[in-house]
Amino acid sequence: MDTAHSDSPVLRESSGEKGGIRTGLKNKLIWTMLGVGALPLVLAMILSYLQGTKSLQGVIGASFKALAYETSTKIDLLIEGEISKNIRHAAHPIIKSVIQDFNQTLLDPVTRQKNIQEQSRNPSSAQPLLAAETVLQGFQKRKTPSALATRALYITDAFGVLRASVNDFPEFLHTGKPEWEKTLTGGKDFVYIGPVTFNEKTQSFLMPFAFPILDEKEKTIGVLHHVFETKEFFSGYMEPITFGETGHVMLIDSRGMVLDCPILPTGFVLPDPVLVRSVTGKNPDWVKTMGDGHGGEELSIIGFSPLEQTRKWISGSDGKTWYTFAWQASDELFAPMQKLFSWISMAGVVSVLLIGGMGSLAAKKIVQPIRRLQKAAERIGRGEKVEALEIKTGDELEALATEVNLMNDLLQKSFSGLENQVLKKTEEVLYLKEYTDSILRSVPDAVAIFDPNLKIEYVNGAFEKVVRQTADQLQGHSLIDLGLESTPAWKVLQDVLLNFYSEVVPISSRTMGNQTIQCYTARDPLAPKESPSLQSMKQTVKLDGKVFAFQVFDVVIHDD
């Protein structure tokens, strides 16, 4: 009983320790490897994606900037060529002579005012300048893009009076109009490029140009007017510039009004003032903006460039600076970035899985020897014989296995010595028991030994003969429980035992398990008690007609 009670708490504690292990060493190693390996990898991939996205945006922005600048240079050359051509037209001898003749006839203010009023009331009364008109019409014979985009080509004299035209588009009197006034007073090198405005007569947006007509002294004597339909003038040069499905270049002015675009109509004003300010800088550049001017609100990359040469002429005309605007839809533009993100994400997932798999294999190789050591330690703790462990890892685990084997050998030797001692002691106990039993059996007197509860533990053969029962029948019973004959006599013996037991005083007590053990002093049963008369010790009882003398004494039950 004592052994069972002392061992059971140890077993419960061991099982509790195993139950408290929620996460094994293998799982900890795997998670550690994932944390150490995957976290820097993921951070590196995120940084790579951000840097790659930034670099890609920079490349796209630089490409858009270059495209916008190239287109602006191309449009500058187009405008410059058109200006050079019209300056040559304004210097045509017939045009110059006709304007000079009319100016001479109208030098008298009274006559000039009278003729202007009369011709204003009845334009048909004015004699057409057939020669000048023929020259102007000759300028338009070649079906060039600018000729096809022309809506008006005419000349006015120094007094703003219409003198020749290729059609009936222009008004008769231009006095007070900015294109006539600025050109007439601007000097020999002045070129007027007016703002793009909507014309009710043609139901389109028109772009006016004006050039001075100079005499031999390079004095302005008249004005050559050339009016173009804006979209038709630029579309042949700009709209073919496309890339991808939505990428294109368009032309806007500093107000954000569209001059030409493959998607937006001419005259459309970009609704976002922030966007307009972003793409109308002084120098070619590219920007990232929220919104694209085409109805989208996503992040967009836009390249822009002012028309440098044209800006010089427009600034003198108080017009609006023109800009090229390179754009592509965000979905299409950022598709490479999305693809890059997908590839990086896939690479990250695969890398994490590889790290996890390799970590699992590495953890398995590390944990297996530890588990073998753990099982060996458990068996050694239970006292089982364990064979020597063979762990060849070349590290601390191998050294630990060597120490465990050494400990196991020492314990086995200790256990062998203890077993020999136990066997020797057991043999001694068995010998003493047999010796004691032989003595008790050889004693002619009836002998019975009782436990602290006064239950029979041992009887010799003489006692068996007295009660006529075997030792197996008697063990574990008190004298009055046996149902023996002469019950009163046996009850007397039982009472004597009780009285004697109550007088025995233990010398000490100790606790073993959950039991308190009383320790008694041993006494030689053959030594007489200290009393005035030995006769007073003699007690008798009559059993089955025979008189028996009996004596009760105590023996050692437990020893320290």
Image: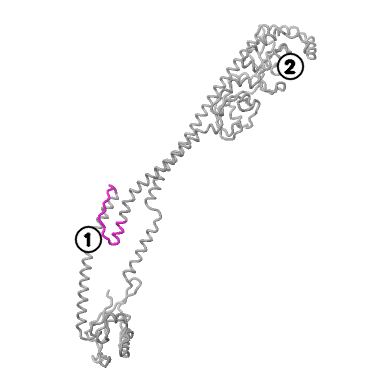
Tell me the residue that label 2 is attached to.
Answer: 171
Estimate the spatial distance between the alpha carbons at disc 1 and disc 2, rounded to whole Å. Answer: 129 Å
Question: In the image, 347: left or right of 277?
Answer: left
Tell me the residue that label 1 is attached to.
Answer: 413
Quadrant assignment, res 382 = bottom left
Measured from the top left, where is residue 253 in percent x and y?
62, 25
Q: Nearer the viewer, residue 250 or 480?
A: 480
Span of residues in magenta: 375-395
Quadrant assignment, res 383 = bottom left
Residue type at the position of mark 1: Lys
Q: Quadrant of the C terminus?
A: bottom left
Residue type at the position of mark 2: Glu
Q: Residue 383 colored magenta?
A: yes
Instruction: Give the label on residue 537, or none.
Output: none
- Indicate the secondary structure of the residue bearing disc 2: loop
- Indicate the secondary structure of the residue bearing disc 1: helix
Secondary structure, magenta segment, majority class: loop
Question: In the image, 181: left or right of 324?
Answer: right
Q: Residue at x 64, y 16 (%)?
A: 148
Dot 1: within a 10 Å radius of its alpha carbon, few (fewer than 14), some, or many (20 or more) residues?
Answer: few
